[in-house]
Protein backbone atom coordinates (compact mmCIF):
# COMPACT_ATOMS: atom_id res chain seq x y z
CA UNK A 1 0.00 0.00 0.00
CA UNK A 2 1.30 3.39 -1.00
CA UNK A 3 -0.40 4.93 2.05
CA UNK A 4 1.85 2.95 4.38
CA UNK A 5 4.87 4.91 3.13
CA UNK A 6 3.53 8.19 4.52
CA UNK A 7 3.88 8.61 8.25
CA UNK A 8 2.36 11.10 10.65
CA UNK A 9 -0.06 13.91 9.94
CA UNK A 10 2.09 15.58 7.30
CA UNK A 11 2.61 12.19 5.65
CA UNK A 12 -1.15 11.63 5.56
CA UNK A 13 -1.49 15.14 4.08
CA UNK A 14 1.03 14.25 1.34
CA UNK A 15 -0.72 10.99 0.51
CA UNK A 16 -4.22 12.48 0.21
CA UNK A 17 -2.81 15.42 -1.79
CA UNK A 18 -1.32 13.02 -4.31
CA UNK A 19 -4.65 11.23 -4.68
CA UNK A 20 -6.33 14.54 -5.50
CA UNK A 21 -3.49 15.61 -7.77
CA UNK A 22 -3.68 12.49 -9.91
CA UNK A 23 -7.22 13.28 -10.94
CA UNK A 24 -6.97 15.88 -13.72
CA UNK A 25 -10.70 16.60 -13.44
CA UNK A 26 -9.90 18.05 -9.99
CA UNK A 27 -6.62 19.91 -10.49
CA UNK A 28 -4.35 20.79 -13.42
CA UNK A 29 -0.78 21.99 -13.64
CA UNK A 30 -0.12 23.49 -10.23
CA UNK A 31 -3.78 24.34 -9.55
CA UNK A 32 -5.41 23.39 -6.27
CA UNK A 33 -3.78 23.28 -2.86
CA UNK A 34 -3.99 21.48 0.45
CA UNK A 35 -2.96 22.07 4.05
CA UNK A 36 -2.74 20.63 7.54
CA UNK A 37 -2.44 22.42 10.87
CA UNK A 38 -0.11 20.62 13.27
CA UNK A 39 0.19 22.36 16.64
CA UNK A 40 0.65 26.06 15.89
CA UNK A 41 2.13 25.44 12.44
CA UNK A 42 0.14 25.64 9.20
CA UNK A 43 1.69 23.44 6.50
CA UNK A 44 0.40 24.61 3.12
CA UNK A 45 1.35 23.46 -0.35
CA UNK A 46 3.99 25.60 -2.01
CA UNK A 47 3.02 27.84 -4.91
CA UNK A 48 3.08 26.21 -8.34
CA UNK A 49 4.08 22.70 -7.23
CA UNK A 50 2.09 19.80 -8.62
CA UNK A 51 -0.20 18.04 -6.11
CA UNK A 52 0.21 14.71 -7.95
CA UNK A 53 3.88 14.45 -6.99
CA UNK A 54 4.16 16.54 -3.78
CA UNK A 55 6.28 15.35 -0.89
CA UNK A 56 6.70 16.78 2.61
CA UNK A 57 9.28 19.26 1.33
CA UNK A 58 6.69 20.79 -1.02
CA UNK A 59 4.73 22.17 1.98
CA UNK A 60 5.61 25.55 3.45
CA UNK A 61 5.48 25.62 7.30
CA UNK A 62 4.09 28.89 8.65
CA UNK A 63 3.33 30.16 12.15
CA UNK A 64 -0.48 30.07 12.19
CA UNK A 65 -0.89 33.06 14.51
CA UNK A 66 1.37 35.12 12.24
CA UNK A 67 -0.73 34.16 9.18
CA UNK A 68 -3.92 35.07 11.05
CA UNK A 69 -2.51 38.53 11.69
CA UNK A 70 -1.98 38.93 7.93
CA UNK A 71 -5.57 37.78 7.41
CA UNK A 72 -6.81 40.49 9.78
CA UNK A 73 -5.63 43.16 7.34
CA UNK A 74 -8.61 44.63 5.55
CA UNK A 75 -7.01 45.53 2.26
CA UNK A 76 -3.86 43.90 1.01
CA UNK A 77 -2.51 43.46 -2.48
CA UNK A 78 -0.98 40.10 -3.29
CA UNK A 79 2.61 41.35 -3.55
CA UNK A 80 2.41 42.72 -0.02
CA UNK A 81 0.55 39.59 1.16
CA UNK A 82 3.34 37.31 -0.13
CA UNK A 83 5.93 39.52 1.57
CA UNK A 84 4.08 39.30 4.90
CA UNK A 85 3.58 35.53 4.55
CA UNK A 86 7.26 35.07 3.87
CA UNK A 87 7.91 36.59 7.27
CA UNK A 88 5.66 33.91 8.85
CA UNK A 89 7.77 30.99 7.64
CA UNK A 90 8.79 28.69 10.49
CA UNK A 91 11.79 27.25 8.66
CA UNK A 92 14.06 28.21 5.78
CA UNK A 93 14.63 27.39 3.06
CA UNK A 94 10.96 26.66 2.38
CA UNK A 95 8.82 26.74 -0.76
CA UNK A 96 6.94 29.94 -1.50
CA UNK A 97 3.52 29.45 0.20
CA UNK A 98 0.45 29.06 -1.99
CA UNK A 99 -1.42 32.22 -3.03
CA UNK A 100 -4.40 30.63 -1.17
CA UNK A 101 -2.55 30.37 2.16
CA UNK A 102 -4.91 32.81 3.88
CA UNK A 103 -7.91 30.70 2.83
CA UNK A 104 -6.38 27.69 4.58
CA UNK A 105 -5.62 29.74 7.69
CA UNK A 106 -9.13 31.23 7.76
CA UNK A 107 -10.88 27.85 8.01
CA UNK A 108 -10.79 26.39 11.54
CA UNK A 109 -10.27 22.77 10.44
CA UNK A 110 -7.24 20.56 10.71
CA UNK A 111 -7.16 19.44 7.08
CA UNK A 112 -8.28 21.62 4.17
CA UNK A 113 -8.36 20.78 0.44
CA UNK A 114 -9.02 23.18 -2.42
CA UNK A 115 -9.52 22.08 -6.04
CA UNK A 116 -10.91 23.47 -9.29
CA UNK A 117 -13.15 20.43 -9.81
CA UNK A 118 -14.57 20.44 -13.36
CA UNK A 119 -17.91 18.91 -12.38
CA UNK A 120 -18.62 21.47 -9.66
CA UNK A 121 -17.75 24.32 -12.04
CA UNK A 122 -20.02 22.81 -14.72
CA UNK A 123 -22.87 23.05 -12.20
CA UNK A 124 -22.31 26.46 -10.60
CA UNK A 125 -20.64 28.48 -13.40
CA UNK A 126 -24.04 29.19 -14.85
CA UNK A 127 -26.64 31.91 -15.06
CA UNK A 128 -28.72 30.22 -12.35
CA UNK A 129 -25.67 28.78 -10.51
CA UNK A 130 -26.36 30.50 -7.21
CA UNK A 131 -29.82 28.95 -6.85
CA UNK A 132 -28.66 25.56 -8.13
CA UNK A 133 -25.77 25.48 -5.63
CA UNK A 134 -28.11 26.42 -2.77
CA UNK A 135 -30.56 23.64 -3.70
CA UNK A 136 -27.88 21.06 -4.32
CA UNK A 137 -25.49 21.68 -1.44
CA UNK A 138 -27.40 23.76 1.11
CA UNK A 139 -25.61 23.81 4.45
CA UNK A 140 -23.33 20.94 3.36
CA UNK A 141 -21.24 23.39 1.30
CA UNK A 142 -22.53 27.00 1.23
CA UNK A 143 -21.74 29.09 -1.84
CA UNK A 144 -19.11 31.84 -1.68
CA UNK A 145 -19.53 34.57 -4.33
CA UNK A 146 -16.52 35.27 -6.54
CA UNK A 147 -13.59 37.05 -4.87
CA UNK A 148 -10.01 37.50 -5.94
CA UNK A 149 -7.61 34.95 -4.41
CA UNK A 150 -5.88 36.35 -1.37
CA UNK A 151 -7.23 38.27 1.58
CA UNK A 152 -10.58 39.00 -0.14
CA UNK A 153 -11.41 35.36 -0.86
CA UNK A 154 -10.18 34.15 2.54
CA UNK A 155 -12.29 36.75 4.39
CA UNK A 156 -15.35 35.91 2.27
CA UNK A 157 -14.96 32.19 3.04
CA UNK A 158 -14.70 32.87 6.75
CA UNK A 159 -17.75 35.14 6.65
CA UNK A 160 -19.88 32.61 4.74
CA UNK A 161 -18.81 29.81 7.05
CA UNK A 162 -19.72 31.74 10.19
CA UNK A 163 -23.03 32.97 8.74
CA UNK A 164 -24.21 29.74 7.14
CA UNK A 165 -22.03 26.88 8.38
CA UNK A 166 -23.55 24.19 10.62
CA UNK A 167 -22.43 20.90 12.14
CA UNK A 168 -23.17 19.29 8.78
CA UNK A 169 -20.93 21.64 6.77
CA UNK A 170 -18.02 19.84 5.07
CA UNK A 171 -16.94 22.41 2.53
CA UNK A 172 -17.56 25.59 0.55
CA UNK A 173 -18.38 26.09 -3.13
CA UNK A 174 -16.40 28.97 -4.68
CA UNK A 175 -18.37 30.45 -7.57
CA UNK A 176 -16.37 30.75 -10.83
CA UNK A 177 -13.35 29.26 -9.08
CA UNK A 178 -13.66 25.82 -7.45
CA UNK A 179 -14.40 24.09 -4.19
CA UNK A 180 -13.04 23.65 -0.66
CA UNK A 181 -13.48 20.65 1.63
CA UNK A 182 -12.24 20.07 5.17
CA UNK A 183 -12.11 17.51 7.92
CA UNK A 184 -10.42 16.35 11.12
CA UNK A 185 -8.31 13.73 9.34
CA UNK A 186 -6.68 13.60 5.91
CA UNK A 187 -9.02 10.79 4.98
CA UNK A 188 -12.20 12.57 6.12
CA UNK A 189 -11.18 15.76 4.35
CA UNK A 190 -10.35 13.91 1.12
CA UNK A 191 -13.59 11.93 1.26
CA UNK A 192 -15.56 15.14 1.82
CA UNK A 193 -14.01 16.57 -1.35
CA UNK A 194 -14.98 13.45 -3.33
CA UNK A 195 -18.49 13.53 -1.85
CA UNK A 196 -19.07 17.14 -2.93
CA UNK A 197 -17.74 16.42 -6.42
CA UNK A 198 -19.93 13.32 -6.74
CA UNK A 199 -23.03 15.35 -5.88
CA UNK A 200 -22.23 17.63 -8.83
CA UNK A 201 -21.61 14.66 -11.11
CA UNK A 202 -24.93 13.06 -10.16
CA UNK A 203 -26.71 16.35 -10.79
CA UNK A 204 -25.23 16.65 -14.29
CA UNK A 205 -26.18 13.05 -15.06
CA UNK A 206 -29.74 13.60 -13.84
CA UNK A 207 -29.99 16.68 -16.07
CA UNK A 208 -28.70 14.80 -19.13
CA UNK A 209 -25.69 17.12 -19.11
CA UNK A 210 -22.94 14.59 -18.45
CA UNK A 211 -22.25 12.91 -21.79
CA UNK A 212 -19.89 14.79 -24.08
CA UNK A 213 -20.40 14.59 -27.82
CA UNK A 214 -17.63 12.28 -28.95
CA UNK A 215 -18.97 11.26 -32.36
CA UNK A 216 -16.29 11.41 -35.01
CA UNK A 217 -16.79 14.28 -37.44
CA UNK A 218 -15.52 14.57 -41.02
CA UNK A 219 -12.15 16.32 -40.97
CA UNK A 220 -11.06 18.34 -43.99
CA UNK A 221 -7.33 18.16 -44.69
CA UNK A 222 -5.46 21.11 -43.21
CA UNK A 223 -3.37 23.32 -45.47
CA UNK A 224 -0.13 23.44 -43.49
CA UNK A 225 0.73 26.86 -44.91
CA UNK A 226 -2.49 28.24 -43.41
CA UNK A 227 -1.56 26.83 -39.99
CA UNK A 228 1.99 28.18 -40.26
CA UNK A 229 0.61 31.60 -41.24
CA UNK A 230 -1.54 31.61 -38.10
CA UNK A 231 1.43 30.75 -35.89
CA UNK A 232 3.53 33.41 -37.66
CA UNK A 233 0.87 36.07 -37.04
CA UNK A 234 0.51 35.08 -33.38
CA UNK A 235 4.30 35.13 -32.92
CA UNK A 236 4.46 38.60 -34.45
CA UNK A 237 1.77 39.76 -32.01
CA UNK A 238 3.72 38.24 -29.10
CA UNK A 239 7.05 39.66 -30.19
CA UNK A 240 8.73 36.25 -29.93
CA UNK A 241 8.32 32.82 -31.55
CA UNK A 242 5.48 30.70 -30.16
CA UNK A 243 5.00 26.96 -30.53
CA UNK A 244 1.47 26.02 -31.62
CA UNK A 245 -0.09 22.58 -31.31
CA UNK A 246 -3.29 21.60 -33.09
CA UNK A 247 -5.82 19.15 -31.63
CA UNK A 248 -8.63 17.77 -33.78
CA UNK A 249 -10.33 15.05 -31.75
CA UNK A 250 -14.16 14.89 -31.80
CA UNK A 251 -14.59 16.95 -28.59
CA UNK A 252 -12.56 19.89 -29.93
CA UNK A 253 -13.98 19.73 -33.44
CA UNK A 254 -17.58 19.54 -32.19
CA UNK A 255 -16.94 22.56 -29.95
CA UNK A 256 -15.46 24.69 -32.74
CA UNK A 257 -18.53 23.91 -34.88
CA UNK A 258 -21.17 24.89 -32.32
CA UNK A 259 -23.69 27.44 -33.61
CA UNK A 260 -23.28 29.40 -30.39
CA UNK A 261 -19.45 29.25 -30.35
CA UNK A 262 -19.06 33.03 -30.45
CA UNK A 263 -21.20 33.31 -27.31
CA UNK A 264 -20.15 30.34 -25.18
CA UNK A 265 -16.42 30.73 -25.88
CA UNK A 266 -16.40 34.44 -25.03
CA UNK A 267 -17.50 34.29 -21.37
CA UNK A 268 -14.16 33.54 -19.74
CA UNK A 269 -12.32 30.55 -18.24
CA UNK A 270 -13.97 28.20 -15.75
CA UNK A 271 -11.43 29.17 -13.07
CA UNK A 272 -8.96 32.09 -13.04
CA UNK A 273 -5.94 29.75 -12.94
CA UNK A 274 -6.65 28.54 -16.49
CA UNK A 275 -6.31 32.12 -17.79
CA UNK A 276 -2.65 32.04 -16.78
CA UNK A 277 -2.05 29.64 -19.68
CA UNK A 278 -5.00 30.31 -22.02
CA UNK A 279 -5.66 34.06 -21.46
CA UNK A 280 -9.22 35.09 -20.70
CA UNK A 281 -10.72 34.42 -24.12
CA UNK A 282 -9.78 32.28 -27.11
CA UNK A 283 -9.50 33.73 -30.59
CA UNK A 284 -12.35 32.48 -32.79
CA UNK A 285 -11.29 32.14 -36.44
CA UNK A 286 -7.98 33.23 -37.96
CA UNK A 287 -7.87 37.01 -37.57
CA UNK A 288 -5.01 37.64 -35.13
CA UNK A 289 -5.14 41.42 -35.70
CA UNK A 290 -8.73 41.51 -34.49
CA UNK A 291 -7.83 39.42 -31.42
CA UNK A 292 -4.96 41.78 -30.63
CA UNK A 293 -7.16 44.87 -30.83
CA UNK A 294 -9.78 43.24 -28.60
CA UNK A 295 -7.17 42.08 -26.10
CA UNK A 296 -5.54 45.52 -25.83
CA UNK A 297 -8.96 47.12 -25.28
CA UNK A 298 -9.73 44.58 -22.56
CA UNK A 299 -6.43 45.22 -20.75
CA UNK A 300 -6.90 48.97 -20.99
CA UNK A 301 -10.44 48.96 -19.59
CA UNK A 302 -9.67 46.49 -16.78
CA UNK A 303 -6.10 47.28 -15.73
CA UNK A 304 -5.23 50.65 -17.26
CA UNK A 305 -1.58 50.80 -18.26
CA UNK A 306 -0.43 48.35 -15.55
CA UNK A 307 -0.27 45.39 -17.93
CA UNK A 308 1.39 47.05 -20.92
CA UNK A 309 4.90 45.83 -20.28
CA UNK A 310 3.98 42.48 -18.77
CA UNK A 311 1.43 40.90 -21.10
CA UNK A 312 1.75 40.43 -24.85
CA UNK A 313 -1.39 40.57 -26.98
CA UNK A 314 -1.07 37.26 -28.86
CA UNK A 315 -3.75 34.58 -28.45
CA UNK A 316 -2.93 31.37 -26.57
CA UNK A 317 -6.02 29.50 -27.79
CA UNK A 318 -7.48 29.67 -31.30
CA UNK A 319 -10.73 27.91 -32.22
CA UNK A 320 -11.34 27.22 -35.89
CA UNK A 321 -13.91 24.91 -37.48
CA UNK A 322 -11.26 23.41 -39.80
CA UNK A 323 -8.13 23.52 -37.63
CA UNK A 324 -9.89 22.50 -34.39
CA UNK A 325 -8.17 23.67 -31.19
CA UNK A 326 -4.83 25.47 -31.63
CA UNK A 327 -2.89 26.10 -28.42
CA UNK A 328 0.13 28.39 -28.25
CA UNK A 329 2.92 28.74 -25.74
CA UNK A 330 6.46 30.02 -25.29
CA UNK A 331 7.56 26.43 -25.80
CA UNK A 332 5.96 23.07 -26.54
CA UNK A 333 5.35 22.32 -22.84
CA UNK A 334 3.37 25.50 -22.32
CA UNK A 335 1.41 24.98 -25.54
CA UNK A 336 0.56 21.52 -24.21
CA UNK A 337 -0.56 22.94 -20.85
CA UNK A 338 -2.69 25.61 -22.56
CA UNK A 339 -4.36 22.91 -24.67
CA UNK A 340 -5.06 20.77 -21.63
CA UNK A 341 -6.53 23.66 -19.61
CA UNK A 342 -8.75 24.66 -22.51
CA UNK A 343 -9.96 21.09 -23.09
CA UNK A 344 -11.17 21.11 -19.48
CA UNK A 345 -12.86 24.46 -20.11
CA UNK A 346 -14.56 22.94 -23.18
CA UNK A 347 -15.92 20.07 -21.09
CA UNK A 348 -17.17 22.46 -18.42
CA UNK A 349 -18.74 24.84 -20.96
CA UNK A 350 -20.42 21.97 -22.86
CA UNK A 351 -21.89 20.49 -19.67
CA UNK A 352 -22.91 23.86 -18.21
CA UNK A 353 -24.61 24.77 -21.49
CA UNK A 354 -26.47 21.47 -21.48
CA UNK A 355 -28.36 22.29 -18.25
CA UNK A 356 -28.21 26.11 -18.10
CA UNK A 357 -26.25 29.05 -19.59
CA UNK A 358 -22.48 29.07 -19.02
CA UNK A 359 -21.03 32.06 -17.15
CA UNK A 360 -17.57 32.99 -15.80
CA UNK A 361 -16.01 35.49 -13.39
CA UNK A 362 -16.15 39.21 -14.31
CA UNK A 363 -13.48 40.24 -16.82
CA UNK A 364 -11.72 42.53 -14.37
CA UNK A 365 -11.14 39.60 -12.00
CA UNK A 366 -9.65 37.47 -14.76
CA UNK A 367 -7.49 40.37 -15.98
CA UNK A 368 -6.10 40.69 -12.47
CA UNK A 369 -5.25 36.96 -12.45
CA UNK A 370 -3.61 37.27 -15.88
CA UNK A 371 -1.53 40.17 -14.66
CA UNK A 372 -0.45 38.56 -11.40
CA UNK A 373 0.60 35.22 -12.83
CA UNK A 374 0.61 35.78 -16.58
CA UNK A 375 3.90 37.61 -16.68
CA UNK A 376 5.55 34.24 -16.14
CA UNK A 377 6.23 33.77 -19.86
CA UNK A 378 8.22 36.97 -20.14
CA UNK A 379 10.10 36.05 -16.96
CA UNK A 380 10.78 32.57 -18.35
CA UNK A 381 12.08 34.01 -21.61
CA UNK A 382 14.40 36.36 -19.74
CA UNK A 383 15.63 33.59 -17.44
CA UNK A 384 16.51 31.14 -20.20
CA UNK A 385 17.58 33.58 -22.91
CA UNK A 386 21.25 32.61 -22.56
CA UNK A 387 20.88 28.81 -22.15
CA UNK A 388 17.96 28.34 -24.54
CA UNK A 389 18.57 30.53 -27.59
CA UNK A 390 16.12 28.41 -29.62
CA UNK A 391 13.15 28.82 -27.21
CA UNK A 392 9.89 28.75 -29.16
CA UNK A 393 11.57 27.57 -32.39
CA UNK A 394 10.74 24.44 -34.36
CA UNK A 395 13.40 22.18 -35.87
CA UNK A 396 13.04 19.21 -38.22
CA UNK A 397 15.82 16.66 -38.53
CA UNK A 398 15.99 14.57 -41.70
CA UNK A 399 17.29 10.95 -41.46
CA UNK A 400 20.78 11.45 -42.86
CA UNK A 401 21.47 14.42 -40.58
CA UNK A 402 20.33 12.34 -37.63
CA UNK A 403 22.60 9.44 -38.58
CA UNK A 404 25.73 11.59 -38.71
CA UNK A 405 24.79 13.41 -35.52
CA UNK A 406 22.64 11.19 -33.29
CA UNK A 407 22.87 13.62 -30.37
CA UNK A 408 21.39 16.50 -32.41
CA UNK A 409 17.76 16.11 -31.12
CA UNK A 410 18.91 16.29 -27.50
CA UNK A 411 21.14 19.29 -28.21
CA UNK A 412 18.29 21.19 -29.87
CA UNK A 413 15.83 20.27 -27.08
CA UNK A 414 18.34 21.51 -24.52
CA UNK A 415 18.51 24.81 -26.40
CA UNK A 416 14.74 25.21 -26.05
CA UNK A 417 13.57 24.12 -29.51
CA UNK A 418 10.67 21.81 -30.33
CA UNK A 419 12.09 18.97 -32.40
CA UNK A 420 10.66 16.65 -35.04
CA UNK A 421 12.77 13.71 -36.14
CA UNK A 422 12.16 11.60 -39.20
CA UNK A 423 12.85 7.98 -38.33
CA UNK A 424 12.08 5.26 -35.79
CA UNK A 425 11.88 5.73 -32.02
CA UNK A 426 14.70 3.24 -31.49
CA UNK A 427 17.10 5.77 -33.01
CA UNK A 428 16.22 8.47 -30.49
CA UNK A 429 16.11 6.47 -27.28
CA UNK A 430 12.33 6.97 -27.07
CA UNK A 431 12.34 10.56 -25.81
CA UNK A 432 8.76 11.32 -24.77
CA UNK A 433 7.81 14.93 -24.12
CA UNK A 434 5.64 17.53 -25.83
CA UNK A 435 8.71 19.15 -27.41
CA UNK A 436 9.65 16.03 -29.31
CA UNK A 437 7.85 14.12 -32.04
CA UNK A 438 8.60 11.39 -34.52
CA UNK A 439 7.33 11.95 -38.06
CA UNK A 440 7.10 9.59 -41.06
CA UNK A 441 9.83 9.17 -43.63
CA UNK A 442 8.02 11.08 -46.34
CA UNK A 443 8.59 14.78 -46.96
CA UNK A 444 4.95 15.81 -47.24
CA UNK A 445 3.74 13.80 -44.24
CA UNK A 446 6.77 14.85 -42.17
CA UNK A 447 6.05 18.54 -42.80
CA UNK A 448 2.28 18.17 -42.23
CA UNK A 449 2.82 16.46 -38.88
CA UNK A 450 5.52 18.86 -37.74
CA UNK A 451 3.31 21.85 -38.49
CA UNK A 452 0.31 20.21 -36.77
CA UNK A 453 2.39 19.47 -33.65
CA UNK A 454 4.40 22.70 -33.48
CA UNK A 455 2.83 25.28 -35.81
CA UNK A 456 5.55 25.78 -38.38
CA UNK A 457 9.19 25.23 -39.21
CA UNK A 458 12.18 27.42 -38.40
CA UNK A 459 15.15 25.13 -39.01
CA UNK A 460 15.72 22.10 -41.18
CA UNK A 461 18.69 19.83 -40.57
CA UNK A 462 19.24 17.77 -43.71
CA UNK A 463 22.24 16.42 -45.51
CA UNK A 464 22.76 16.40 -48.26
CA UNK A 465 20.50 19.38 -48.76
CA UNK A 466 18.82 18.17 -51.94
CA UNK A 467 16.30 19.82 -54.16
CA UNK A 468 13.08 18.08 -53.02
CA UNK A 469 13.74 19.23 -49.45
CA UNK A 470 14.62 22.78 -50.44
CA UNK A 471 11.48 23.08 -52.56
CA UNK A 472 9.23 21.57 -49.89
CA UNK A 473 10.46 23.63 -46.94
CA UNK A 474 11.16 26.99 -48.59
CA UNK A 475 7.56 28.30 -48.27
CA UNK A 476 7.38 27.25 -44.61
CA UNK A 477 10.76 28.77 -43.77
CA UNK A 478 9.62 31.99 -45.44
CA UNK A 479 6.86 32.21 -42.77
CA UNK A 480 9.25 31.58 -39.87
CA UNK A 481 9.13 34.30 -37.20
CA UNK A 482 12.91 33.93 -36.66
CA UNK A 483 15.99 33.92 -38.85
CA UNK A 484 16.20 30.15 -39.21
CA UNK A 485 16.74 28.28 -42.45
CA UNK A 486 18.41 25.13 -43.66
CA UNK A 487 21.18 24.10 -41.31
CA UNK A 488 24.14 21.87 -41.86
CA UNK A 489 25.20 19.85 -38.84
CA UNK A 490 28.34 20.73 -36.94
CA UNK A 491 29.56 17.20 -37.48
CA UNK A 492 29.50 17.51 -41.24
CA UNK A 493 31.37 20.80 -41.15
CA UNK A 494 34.04 19.14 -39.04
CA UNK A 495 34.43 16.22 -41.41
CA UNK A 496 34.61 18.60 -44.30
CA UNK A 497 37.42 20.57 -42.64
CA UNK A 498 39.41 17.45 -41.77
CA UNK A 499 39.24 16.15 -45.30
CA UNK A 500 40.45 19.35 -46.82
CA UNK A 501 43.84 18.94 -48.55
ZN1 LIG B 1 -7.94 28.06 -6.61
Image (cartoon, helix red, strand yellow):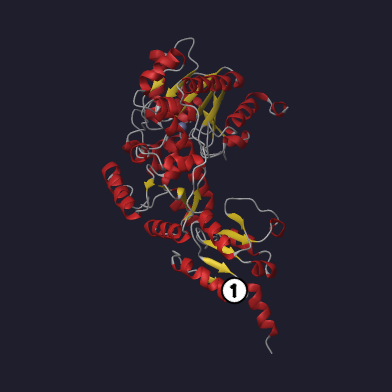
Q: Position of residue 301 (x, y in %)?
A: 26, 43
Quarter occupied by the C terminus: bottom right
Residue positioned 56% across, 71% down in the render:
469
* 75 displayed left or right of 426: left
Is 248 above or below relative to 131? below
Q: Position of residue 450 (x, y in %)?
A: 55, 58
Quarter occupied by the N terminus: top right
Q: Secondary structure at mark 1?
A: loop
Is 69 above or below relative to 344? above
Classify residue 155 by image quadrant. Answer: top left
Q: Position of residue 78 (x, y in %)?
A: 39, 37
Classify residue 186 by image quadrant. Answer: top right
- The extreme top residue here reads 167
Between residue 79 and residue 304, name the one nearer to us. 304
* 334 displayed left or right of 53: left
Q: What residue is pinned by disc 1?
A: 488
Residue positioned 38% across, 60% down in the render:
236
Amino acid sequence: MEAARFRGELGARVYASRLLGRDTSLVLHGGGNTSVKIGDILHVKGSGSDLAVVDEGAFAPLHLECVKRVLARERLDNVEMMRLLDACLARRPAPKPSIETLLHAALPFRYVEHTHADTVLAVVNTEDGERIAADLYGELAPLVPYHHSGVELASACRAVLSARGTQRTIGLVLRFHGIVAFGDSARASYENMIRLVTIAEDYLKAKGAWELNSAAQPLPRIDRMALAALRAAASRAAGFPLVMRTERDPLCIAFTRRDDLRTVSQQGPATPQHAVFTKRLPQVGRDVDAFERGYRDYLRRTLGSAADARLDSAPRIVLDAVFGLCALGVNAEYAHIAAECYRHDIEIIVRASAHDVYRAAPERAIAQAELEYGGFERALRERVSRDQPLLGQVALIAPAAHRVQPELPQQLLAQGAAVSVIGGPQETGGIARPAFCMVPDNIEAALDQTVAACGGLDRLYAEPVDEPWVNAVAPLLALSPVAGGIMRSAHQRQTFAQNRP
